[in-house]
Image (cartoon, rainbow, N blue to C red):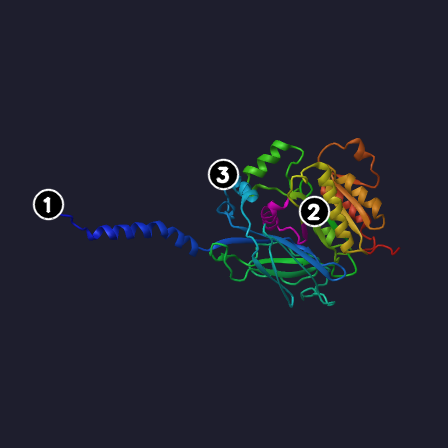
Amino acid sequence: MSLSIHHPNRSLRWVVLFVTLLAPSFVLAAKPRPVDIQAFPSILRADGTWTIKGRVMRKSRWLREDANPGKLRSFMGMVRRFTRKSASKVLLRLALGNLNIETNADEKGYFRFDGQLPTSRPTSSTTSSTTQPSCQKPQFSARTTPYPISAGIYPFTISMPPQKDRKGRPYQSSPFQGFLVHRSGSKGLHLISDLDDTLIWTYVTKKTKLLKQALFNNVNAVKTIEGALPFLQQVLCQPNGQGSGTLHYLSGSPTRLFDRVMRIFQLHGFPLGSLTLRPLSSKSASQGQQSLYKVREIQRILQAYPNERFILLGDNGEKDPVIYNLIRNQYPQRISAILIHQIKPLTLEQQALANTFYFKKYQDASKYLSQISSAPSRAPQK
């Protein structure tokens, strides 16, 4: 007769195995889910209405702001910008002045806030008086606190109240600090500017160099075009060094590059302005769709300030001269000047465009600007 011996440790081993298999699930459920909130610097329209758009996405370790990331980090960071998942249907809270508004992002993480401010507008922060008029527009910076109220800037904060994803993991995010641009006075020239090869070198006409910089170079390697940023300050400070103009960056780069563009702005101290990037879609990649996108966005900015005059700044790498002249034909009383940074020989079509100033150095653009700086900031009423 055989004897069966019961091993008490056998049951314990099954319990340990069971707990080991389930432990990752418990740990995963408790581990926070880090996300990024992104919202474009937008416009407080002349009638007091505003729209703030953005997106909430999962954080990626490849997008950490290292001082000098290598080529692998830069490449994987670019890949993750286009592949990282959204935070679906999360609740967001906007604090704008005395307004507190909540909204839910959609399934893809996109959100939108709309509203109207009281008739009173923020005034410029008090500064010590000087004998000489001065003008230094506020600049982009990496912020953990709201932007200070200053001439033409209305700060806002977007935060995420405590909540969990569908698997019970708590979301974790830092508040996003942004601002609305608004006209703060009756004087000043307003500027709509392209970004690529107009203010920074991206080499759109040299596709191999363009891809190399975009995929393998970190943002620290991106260079501004000599004289571009002082020129922006000069335009915004007209007339007589005390202007109250607004600045609007308009780029054909896709919205997924928002964090990269903002990092470039912060590193180089670009003047604060609204920012519009192209929505990402299969149709928007064509040249015709990009042109249509720019036309519509310029029209939107002009409609936001219906009585103001604008300078249009771009380059001749693609279609900026044609697009800007189309806008001037539609709004002949609203466009003070068209300035085009010449990065390649002019085509016959570009040479035929009247009243377009081409320049290779921003010093020449500054000289041209001095000829129109006395133009009134408001267009004649029809």
Q: Quadrant of the N terminus?
A: top left
Image disc number at residue 359: none
In the rendered image of this protein, does residue 145 appear above or below residue 63? below
What's the magenta bit mostly, secondary-structure-wise?
helix
- Is residue 318 located in the magenta-colored stretch of the structure? no
Badge 3 amino acid: Leu
Place of residue 298 in the rendered image (x, y in percent of width and height, measured from the top left) = 75, 48
In the rendered image of this protein, does residue 368 appear above or below residue 37? above
Image disc number at residue 250: 2
Place of residue 313 in the rendered image (x, y in percent of width and height, measured from the top left) = 74, 45
Category of crowding for the residue at label 2, using alpha-carbon neighbours closer than 10 angstroms: few (below 14), some (14–19), many (at least 20): many
- Magenta-colored span: 254-275
Place of residue 26 in the rendered image (x, y in percent of width and height, measured from the top left) = 39, 54
Residue to which mark 3 is pinned: 72
Category of crowding for the residue at label 3, using alpha-carbon neighbours closer than 10 angstroms: few (below 14), some (14–19), many (at least 20): some
Answer left or right for 33 relative to 152. left
Place of residue 333 in the rendered image (x, y in percent of width and height, measured from the top left) = 85, 50
Q: Tell me the SS state at disc 2.
A: strand
**CA distance separating discs 3 and 2:** 29 Å
Badge 2 amino acid: Leu
Q: Tell me the SS state at disc 1.
A: loop
